[in-house]
Image (tube, rainbow, N blue to C red):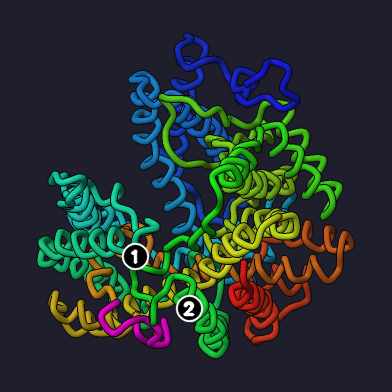
Amino acid sequence: MSDSAAYPVNWNLDSLYPHPETSEFRVLLEQLQADLGQLAAESEDLPSFDVDPGRWREFLDRMAETFARYDDLSAFIGCHAAADAGNKLFQRIEGVLSALGPRREQTLTNVELGLKTITEHRLETIASGHDGLSEILFFLQECRRNAELRLPKQLELLAADLSVDGIHAWGRVYDRLSGDLRIQLMEQGEVVLKSPGQVQFDDAERSVRKNNFYAANKAWNSIAESCAEALNHISGARLTKYRRLGVRDYLDAPLRLNRMSRDTLDTMWSTVQSRKDCLLRYFDAKSQLLGLEKLSWYDIQAPIPAPILSTSRSASHQAAASELSWDAACATVSKTLNEFSSDFGAFAENAMKTGWVEAENRGGKRQGGFCTGFPTRQQTRIFMTFTGSPDSMSTLAHELGHAYHSYVLREQPLLLRDYPMNLAETASTFAEAILGDRRLAEAQSRHEKLSILDNLCADGVSFLMNIHCRFLFEDRFHQERQNGEVSADRLYELMEAAQKEAYLNALDDNGWNPSFWISKLHFYISGWPFYNFPYTFGYLLSTGLYAMAREQGESFSEPYRQFLLATGCQQTEEAVQSSLGYDLTKPDFWNKSLDVIAGYVDQFVTLAEQSE
């Protein structure tokens, strides 16, 4: 990258904290260790909330500040480790900070249990009479609600200890099994072994996609019985705890974690089910472009075939595609976001120009991208690798959306800056959608427009069909698991039935993937049940926001900002109702989102029917 670039390609971490190699940083780390240890010890002896609310206020102030420093240092060392993946010192400090997690969890557990028996009315009365407590009333209410999912203290501590060799051990078993798995493939006449992450299903050649699909499933099927055991015991452990708590609905816990109601979830899925048939037209059009009668599972990610061009024209197209510079990408993102909201645009411009983004394409970096926050500094940092492609420009917009979300919440009390999983991707996906609209409008060729629309429609398939099939499978598996362990053969049946229902039987008869229950990591995440529906929720929420932005123009920027503020201090339904005016237990908002997706399908089908 040129030294004269308008936008730096490397981030500035030195302005946040001393370098991890310095004695100054070691002092900060040692102080954090001591403070977290003292906080955890004091949490064991907290008085009753209604007896000494002043003590609680002082304790919660210190807890918020200490937790924020923990988040700061974790983010700081995470940034260094991502930028220099082989650095052993950074890896060691990551381990030290990870080992402090149980002290934080111990503190929060004691706070929640300390509020478990107090009534809602009494909690509100006490908090309203004490400065410092009234402004964090929502946090206190959340702690009280979360405590409903905790056993009495001694049993909760016992359960936590047993979970290390119980539910979490089964999660680690799956991690080991899937990590050791190797898929046997034939490449250039030689047999090669690849890990699951190395096997792709988006090759332009159908024979390659098909071969990869069957080879991968053969490998996954070889560990089916062991994975069935892991899945049964992870679910069984949860259901056992729910029975002890008197929780009748196994969806209560994941819904509580996402601050949303069963009514909202049911309305979302029922509206999706009634409208998703628009994607069948996309399937038909794509299958025709690929020269197929029907798509199979391994065809869904296939690229749109490129037109056959002359050598000179092909070279010019390739050159044009590689001309996107970092400066040009940043300028485009900045301009696009500014057209939606001057506040958002100014924030993005400042973040990119003052060294909040690490984007250099070089060796030694970790894969992927992320946005991480520094609460005490009221700043964020973005990690990515810019490859000069439009997709990596979209990644930049996506991560800036996360950063803006944190920026809007920066003046809120530290305990009111957190938001649940279902709202976490809203701002990022929204920013990406705004940029996608510009990319589509500026696309030059039919193939480029088709490829962009293919990605947009494929997102609809992922969130309205693939995630739905995961939810249906996990829901029905939990129903049967309540009556005893479920065999591997039955899990295959449940998965294929869920896929056929979620995909409206649209794929080729032999094109389903009943082994999906083995290969999908999300089913085996021991710390978070039903790691599926929040994705669809977040996707549709951001899509609905995008629809409102198109209707209202820049006047929507303030309601949008108010919504982001509400994500930290309100239940999900209340946050949407108070800022956007929609009731999520009714289908209106979800239909607004689905209208956008149906529009993408219409554009794709119309363009697919045209000649090059």
Which residue is label 1 attached to?
Answer: 151
- Relative placement, left or right, of 498 versus 594 is left
Disc 1 to disc 2: CB gap under 8 Å: no
Question: Which three-letter amino acid code belongs to the residue tagged 1?
Answer: Leu
Q: Quadrant of residue 376?
A: top right
Quarter placement of the C terminus: bottom right
User: Which residue is at 21% across, 59% downward?
Assistant: 216
State yes or no: residue 104 in magenta. Answer: no
- SS class of the residue under badge 1? loop
- Report the residue that reaches farthest toward the top: 23
User: Relative to 236, is 193 above or below?
Assistant: above
Expressed as whole percent of the image width and height from the top left, the position of residue 226 reads 11, 62
Between disc 1 and disc 2, the foreground one is 2
Query: Residue at the spot x=48%, y=47% of the render?
Result: 46
For the residues marked 1 and 2, what is the alpha-carbon distance in whole angstroms? 48 Å
The residue that label 2 is drawn on is 283
Task: Answer with the quarter of the image where residue 134 lies.
Answer: bottom right
Work out which quarter of the rendered image holds the N terminus and state it: top right
